[in-house]
Image (cartoon, rainbow, N blue to C red):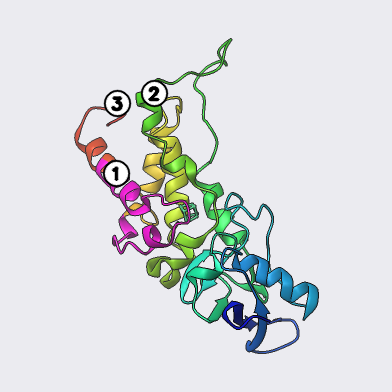
Amino acid sequence: MEKDRVKKFRIKRWDPERASKPRWEEFTVSLDPFERLLDGLIRIKDNLDGSLTFRSSCAHGMCGSCAMKINGKNALACQTLAKNTPEVVVLEPLPAFPVIKDLVVDMDPFFEKIGRIMPWLLEDGPPPERERTQSPEEMKKILDAIKCIMCGCCTSACPVYRAGKDLYLGPASLVKAARFIFDSRDAGWEERLEMVSGKNGIWRCHSIYNCYEVCPRSIDVTGIISRLKRMSVKKMLLPPRRPG
Ligand code: SF4
């Protein structure tokens, strides 16, 4: 192995069905500077330890399945280049979600909360003959939120979510709600806004910005939640129409 390409992967491993607590294991692999950490994980699994467990699918930052904690910060293994990491790469499962095995966490609680905000277009009449159109200005309002790949990095990094994960909807659910609330074609914005304005929604957010800092899609998560807060206040004060 060429010395400058050698990386030590320090991985937190745990099979809760077989062990009472996690353990750390180290693997040494060779990575080119422009290879991703996901390449290193695949190399470890193929050549060193086939029992190492992690998720991956698209490997191009579009599916979100290889989200994990990388050197202390949630990120996608497929988006993290070897040249941007230290000699020792520390990998842990996403915090705040139950560990299934090694770097794989149970995302059911995360998707259950996203399901609560009804992540589909709500209609108030028969479908139109042609598609539902939007002006470029209307589309701009949802452009940031529609980039979300539901990787869970933001929700997992949120200390408010971690403190009361059974309660707070979490940043990813709020981004998904905003994606529809700001959508000019959605007839359910009032119902959705009311839901996210409740005690487990936007007002639990303390604008800590962890969500914004870890988002692999560079979505202004905290800004979107602030827009929802402003909209919620305006709706209380103004006549019933979709506030801007
Ligand atoms: Fe992932 Fe960003 Fe979507 Fe949060 S907002 S789930 S960090 S893509």
Q: Is residue 205 magenta?
A: yes
The residue type indicated by label 3 comes to Arg
Answer few, some or many: residues within 10 Å of disc 2's Cα (few below 14, many 20 plus, some between 14 and 19).
few
Region rendered in magenta = 203-230
Q: Quadrant of residue 26?
A: bottom right
Asked if marks 1 and 2 touch (Cβ < 8 Å), the reply is no
Q: Residue furthest front?
A: 2
The reply to whether residue 211 is in sight is: yes
**Residue 241 bears which disc, if any?**
3
Query: Any mark on residue 136, and which?
Result: 2
Cα–Cα gap, marks 1 and 3: 16 Å
Up-down: is 99 above or below 117? Answer: below
Q: For mark 1, does the 10 Å Cα neighbourhood hold few (<14), some (14 to 19), or many (20 or more) residues?
A: some
The image quadrant that residue 112 belongs to is bottom right
Secondary element at tag 2: helix
- Secondary element type, mark 1: helix
Q: Describe the element under mark 3 as helix, strand or loop.
A: loop
- Percent coordinates x, y for residue 163 in the rendering: 41, 72
Residue kind at label 1, given as amino acid type:
Arg
- Residue at horizontal 62 percent and vertical 60 percent from the top: 108
Write down the residue under mark 1: 227
